[in-house]
Amino acid sequence: MEKSSSKKEKKEEKEERVPKKSQKNKQQKREEKSKSPSKDRSRSRSRSNSNKKSEIKSKNKESDFPSNKQIKIIHWNIAGLRPLLKKGEIDQLIKNENPDIICFNETKIDNDLIKSLKLENLFKDKYKYYCYWNCSTEKKGYAGTAILTKYEPESISYGINIKKHDGEGRVTTVEFEKFYLISCYTPNAGERLKRIDYRVKEWDKDFFDYINNLKSKKDIILTGDLNVARNDMDIFDPKGKEKLPGFTKLEKDSFAKFLDMGYVDTFRDLHPKEQKYSFFTRRGKINTKEANNGWRLDYFITNKDAKNLVIKESDMIDKDKYNASDHIPIFITFNFK
């Protein structure tokens, strides 16, 4: 009786050890799985909450910029993505200009439209761009920015991490090994300048701090409709327009102070006397584009002390080439040092 009991106890002791080991192995596997990089290699990401900064670290980096390649970036305030898709001008832009990166302002879409329009299929499968969309959550079909890139970034962030500024989807930032690229759609001072205090005293201050912080880490390329014409050369017939949004002394002085912090307006730096415009209003009876009666509101800005970037060209694309928007595309080309 005692012998039989002893055998039973040994058997139970052995059985008890086996599940513990098995359980330990399962727990280790679960931990390893949770630490391992995600297998989701989707190139299209959109921001679901504009009131919270979203940072996405790339786990499966597929490609880097070739060191000897000249890189081309296009910025375009498209005044709504859907009309451009219907007219086929985005398709034409990609085929004709072959940019490495495209930055859009004023996309006027939301996350539901990104899915229903199958934008991932269009840009990822057809043209091989990673797509990052920052949509307005405060007002549907308003503002919004996006970056499409053939080279996978190290990180992506949406907004500037200040709640009062981030609800309209006005800033998308991608980080590469040697520089940050920021697509920004600056708020307009508004009709009768009703929003000018917010624009200059709040937005400009906080946004410029955001850019300065990035510049302290690595080179920056800032692009977008910055909603200011720097000086008389940047607007057709400037007389009497000093009270119009985008050309007030307050806005011009604020932008000048920003540039004095160590930044270069690349178009004006390379074309000091050339008068070209990136925006042509469609209000009124005059065809302002045909008359070349415009504003230069769209920019590529870099830091003066760039360690890795050599700017080759910064210019407007022919104003008559693409007509779906009231803005025309602008571009920059550069090499790495």
Image (spheres, rainbow, N blue to C red):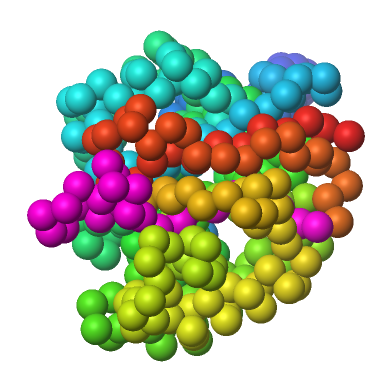
Q: Estimate the x, y position of residue 216 in percent, counting from the top left.
A: 81, 62
Q: Determine which quarter of the picture holds residue 111.
A: top left
In the depicted structure, whether residue 55 falls above or below residue 89: below
Name the main secondary structure of what is drawn in magenta.
Answer: loop
The residue sitting at the top extreme is: 126
Q: Estimate the x, y position of residue 304 in percent, counting from the top left.
A: 80, 57
Q: Estimate the x, y position of residue 149 in percent, counting from the top left.
A: 55, 29
Which sits in the foreground, 37 or 60? 60
227 sits left or right of 220 in the view: left
One can see residue 92 in this view: yes
251 sits left or right of 85 in the view: right
Which sits in the foreground, 308 or 314? 314
Residue stretch in magenta: 280-304
In the depicted structure, whether residue 271 falls above or below residue 247: above
In the depicted structure, whether residue 71 falls above or below residue 304: above
Which sits in the foreground, 334 or 14? 334
Q: Estimate the x, y position of residue 55 in percent, counting from the top left.
A: 58, 50
Label tally: 0
The residue sitting at the left extreme is: 285
150 sits left or right of 121 in the view: right
Which residue is at a point 76% across and 57% down the rendered structure image?
Answer: 303
Which residue is at a point 57% across and 81% down the rendered structure image?
Answer: 253
73 sits left or right of 289 in the view: right
On-image quarter of the C terminus: top right
**Is 299 one of the magenta-colored residues?**
yes
Which residue is at a point 38% across and 76% down the rendered structure image?
Answer: 239
Q: Determine which quarter of the picture holds residue 185.
A: bottom left
Which sits in the foreground, 217 or 314? 314
Which residue is at a point 38% across and 66% down the rendered structure image?
Answer: 237
